[in-house]
Every structure is written in C-alpha cells, then in structure tokens.
Image: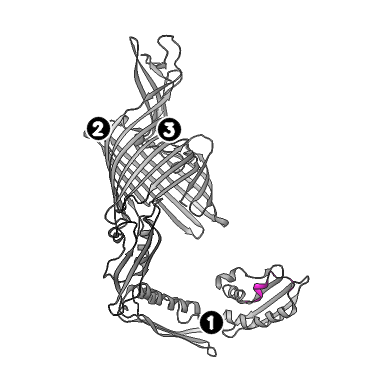
Amino acid sequence: MLLLGCAFAGPQARAGVTITVTGVDDPLRSNVLAYLSFARYQRTKNLTADTVDRLESRIGREVRSALRPFGYFQPTVHSSVTPSGAGNWQVKIAIDPGQPVILQSISVKVEGPGARSRRFQRITSSLPLHTGSPLNEAAYDGVKSDLLRTAATYGYVDAKLTRHELLVNPVAHTASIALELQTGVRYRFGDTTIKQQAVSDKLVRRYLRYRKGDPFNLTQVLRTQFALDDSEYFSNLEVLAGTPDRAGHTVPVSIHADPNRPNVYSIAAGYATDTGARGILSWQDRRVNSYGHKMSVDLEAAQVTKYSLQSRYIIPIGDPAVENLTLSGIVEQQQLADVNSRTMSLGPSVTRVTGRWQTVWFVNGVHATGTVQGTPECPTGNAATPYAQCRDPTTNALIPSITAGTATNDLLVPGVDIASVPKGYLGEPMFEHGFFAEIRGSQGAFGSKANFVQLHIQLERVIDLAPKWHVLLRDELGATAASHFDQMPPAMRFFAGGEGSVRGFAYNDLSPTQDFCENVISKTVTRRECVLNQKAGGKDLFTGSVEFDRDLPRNFGLAVFFDYGNAFNHFGSQEQTIVTSQGLIEQHKEPLIQYGAGVGFRVRLPVLTLGIDIGQPLSQSGSPRLYINFSPKL
C-alpha cells in the first residue's frame, strides 16, 4: 500500500478529481492517498452527487486507517469537496496526525532446539523496532513473518508463535510488543522420489544439493530445481518438498520431469564495431544418451573475425552441475591486425569447481599458420637505402603486392584456466569474472618452435557508488617468456585496441611490428622478398579502463570512460624501425602506454545492454571512433 500511494502523491491534477493532502509528508501522505476511495475515481468525469457524497463520507475513516500503522491513532481530519467545473471535483484534506504512539517495551524471544541458530539470532539482534520510537505496524508484521519464514525454510516444521501481542494504549500513547517463537525440533531430509525418463536416475541424484539425513533446508531444494533446470535435460520440472513425517522428523522430496526435446537449432545475427556484421548458426544435442552427454556445433561468420567452426562433446563428471570433461575442436580464421591467422585445435579439458574457484585443465593439439599481404621490399645491400620495392626479374616491372606466410606451427599446448565464480554457483553461463587467469605453454618436445610460457590475467569489478551511479574497473595483463618469439603463432600473441580494450583505437591496432621475409626462386635467381612493418602481436599486454555510469529513466544510461594500455615486446619507450617508401630506415618512438577517453550511451534491454561509445585517442593524433556493441555487462 505504501508503494501504491507513491503514484498519487499530491496535489494530483487529472481529469475528474484533483486531490490535495496537507499536514503530513511521505510515507504517511502516500499511504493516505493509497487508502482514499476518491483516488480510484481520479480519471472519472461527471461523478454523480450521490457518488461524491458517499466518497466524502469515507474520508475521515480512510485517513485514520492509513495513519494507524504508523502509530497515529488520534488524528484530526478536515476535508472539503467542491466542484471545479465541467464535471470535475476538488478534494482538499488537511490532517493533524496528533501525538504518535511510542513503543514502551519490546520482547522478541526464540525458544526451543533452534534458539541458538544464527539465523534466528540474526533476526532478534537486528530488530527494526526500538523502544522510544513511534509504533510501526509494518515493521512488527515483518518481524513475525521473518520468524515464521525462517522456521519453515530451515526445517522447523512444528514452529509456532506461542505469543504475538501488540498492545496499544491510545490514551497514554504507548504500545508494547511481545513475540515468542517455539521452534520445535529441526527436521531432516528424507527419501527423494524421482519420476523421469530423460536420463539415468543415478545422474539426477548427482545434481541434488543435499543428502538424506542432512538438516532440512528449503533453499537447497530450490537450488536442486535450478541445477536440474540448467542441465537442459528436462521440461515441466518440479522439485517439491513433501508432507513431513512427524514421527520420524523428516521431509521427503519428490522430483518429477518430462524429457526436454534433445535437438535445438538456432540462428542469430548481430553487429559490433570490432567484429562487423556477423551471423551464427548453432546445433545442440542436449541429451546424446542416458548418461547425460551433450554435443554442440557452432558456426560463426563475421566481417572482421572471418569464420569460426567449433564443436564440443561434453561428459558430466563429479558434480555434473559444474564439472565436466569436454572434447573441443575449433577451426577458425581471423584478422589479427595485419595478420590473417588460421588455426585448428583439438583437445580435451576437465572443468572442476572448488568453493568459489573454477579450474579448467586442458591440452590442445594446435595447427597454426597465417599470412600477411603488402608491398614486397627487397634488400639492396646499400646501407643508406637497405630496401627497395622488388621488381620482376624478367620484366623489371615493380611487383605491387605479395602474400608472405608466417611461421607454421604444429604443437601441443597444455594449460590451466582459473576463474572466480559466485557463491552457490550452479553452472549458469558466466559473462564476466571478477578474476580470470590462464597459464599455457609449449616446448620443442611438444612441437613448438618458440618454447614459450604465457600468463594472461583479467580483473573486473563494478562498484555501486550510489543508487544510480556505478563505476566499472577493468584491468588486463599478459606476459610471455619465449626463446623464439618471432616463431609464435599470431593467435597466441597479444593485441590491444578497440571495444573491451583501449577505446579510441582500432580493433587490435596497438601492436609491435614484425618483418616477414621469404626466399623466392625464379629460374636461376634467388632473391629475398619481405613485407615490412606488419603489426603481428606482442609478447606482453597491459590494458585497463575506468568507466562511470549514470542510470537514466526508461532503462537508459550515460557513461564516461578513460582507457589505457598497449601490446608490446619490452618495457620502456617503444622504438619501431620503419622502412619508408623510399627504402630509408627511420626510428619511431612511441609511449609505452597509449590512452583514450570518451562518452557512451546505454540501452538496458531485458537480457543485455546496447552500448554506443565514442572514443578519442589522447596519446597520439587521431579522429574519434564509434563503437557499437551488445553485452550482458553494465
């Protein structure tokens, strides 16, 4: 009733009836308006005189009823109802609430076997009622409800209020409260009955969040429902606590479900500045067999990231809600700055969850290669102009463009991912982690040409500064130790720039450069052709963001942000050796950390957020860039 009243906070001017309430402030005024019968007729024109008289006669009684929950039992109410022309009416109500009823004594006790439960102690130690304060019946009712709800939730099936008294002396303006809960014995989980034919009952029992004989906890029954529902094996799922066995002090649980349709097909399209337009085709077999195995295939094509074909076969292990053995295969082509990278990988992974940490152990067999395209430069042997554009040895014509290959790698890459998960995590999709780290590497015995170890860390946190103000903090760190970094696959290097990295710069545009050369044999002549100064990824990475968000009405929002970072091969000033179009060598110095800032607009849809950002580079000259993305984040 308090919330409903907010819609009528006066004076209210609408066609039909205008209501003005004076003498009291919110929340009292809002509750008065919620109680008034006149408020329900505000949109009605041409009220009859009989209806107006009837509504006016209720004003005093309704106002007193509205103030009583706040401890005002003897208010003085003056009201007038006058016509205001064209079938409209003016209602004026002046209220003197009088002296409030003051709480003189408060006694809230919990007796019985559950008296020492921290859940009940939390209620009794932080009461919203205090002696010397005005009576608030809503707070009194709230304490009663909390006690009974806690008892029902945590298995005190026989609990009852043996005393629940609210005694008011309107003449003395005092009140006293006495509540006493007798908990009775705490019941335990009894037998669980399962009726379903989708997967084996043995697998279903591994989803249970409780064991027979554990103290009953309705929260764990609900968590079992969530875990089974997230498994996608079932439809029409019900997990219900049954009739308590009062002799044995147990509560049975029943699970009933119908099989979900196994095959799901989906098609989706979207757009983001970093990927361009993209489309996704997906197929999933959610129930390959009675053991709960799953299989999925996803095909994605995009303007920038080219294509990706990924397949997974998932076998539940341990706690099947959060743990599994997965065999994954990926074939993808993506544009990484100047490198057109192609990667194929296949391998198993094992996902485990301990407390609030998820670990994924994996080993992938990887075939990686790539190409760069550009104007070929040939060595001249001249120290002043060491390179010149290559010419065809037969016609002596300038060669406009060539495609040079990066190092081809066939290697095994073992590693581990470590991520934070929320308390009570049940395997639901995680779109962001407060902490994520990956360690991977390879060496010559595994086929690697680079002998590398790599660490990648991502940190993210949203801080609520005020009800409508938020700050998003993000940092990303990457480090690589490699014996021959120039032989590492581009897909395993670090890039920066773009949405989710350093806004103000193009996608993957922040990167060290590398020269790619090939020996070309033409008849009896062997020459070396090079594509120079190609952005091909760095050994190390550091990026971060500070973003302030302000919520607006109608699910809109505004943002201002400052992004920073770079991908690099060494710390300190970044010196790049550039070969000009005249074949001259120049040394360019750039700061280690690049940075940009900008503003954004947010549209918060039911399951995701549309972000439109404009970022301006500040560490170097450049034009503003527009970023459009869909994200489940803030």
Res. 71 mark: 1
Work out which residue is located at the far right of the displayed protein and give it. Answer: 85
* Residue occupied by mark 2: 447
Left or right of residue 70, residue 437 in this image: left
Numbered circles on residues, count: 3
Residue 428 lies in quadrant:
bottom left
Secondary element at tag 1: loop
Q: Residue at x 78, y 70 (%)?
A: 86
Q: Quadrant of the N terminus?
A: bottom right
Mark 2–mark 1 distance (CA, rounded to whole Å): 80 Å
**Residues in magenta, as a range:** 36-46
Q: Is residue 485 left or right of residue 576?
A: left
Q: Is residue 258 magenta?
A: no
- Say whether disc 3 or disc 1 marks the residue closer to the N-terminus: 1
Q: Amino acid at mark 2?
A: Gly
Q: Residue furthest bottom?
A: 171
Q: Gap in Å between the C-alphas at discs 3 and 1? A: 70 Å
In terms of secondary structure, what is the magenta stretch mainly? loop
The one nearer the camera, 1 or 517, is 1
Confirm whether the magenta stretch covers residue 38.
yes
Q: Nearer the viewer, residue 555 or 563?
A: 555
Under mark 1, the amino acid is Gly
Residue type, label 3: Ala
Q: Is residue 489 above or below residue 390?
A: below
| 617 on left or right of 113 | right
Q: Which residue is mark 3?
A: 337
Residue 244 image position (x, y, % from top left) = 33, 76
Quarter where residue 152 is shown: bottom left
**Observer-nearest of 352 and 372:** 352
Q: Secondary structure at mark 2?
A: loop
Density class for disc 2 (Cα within 10 Å; few <14, some 14-19, many ≥20) is some
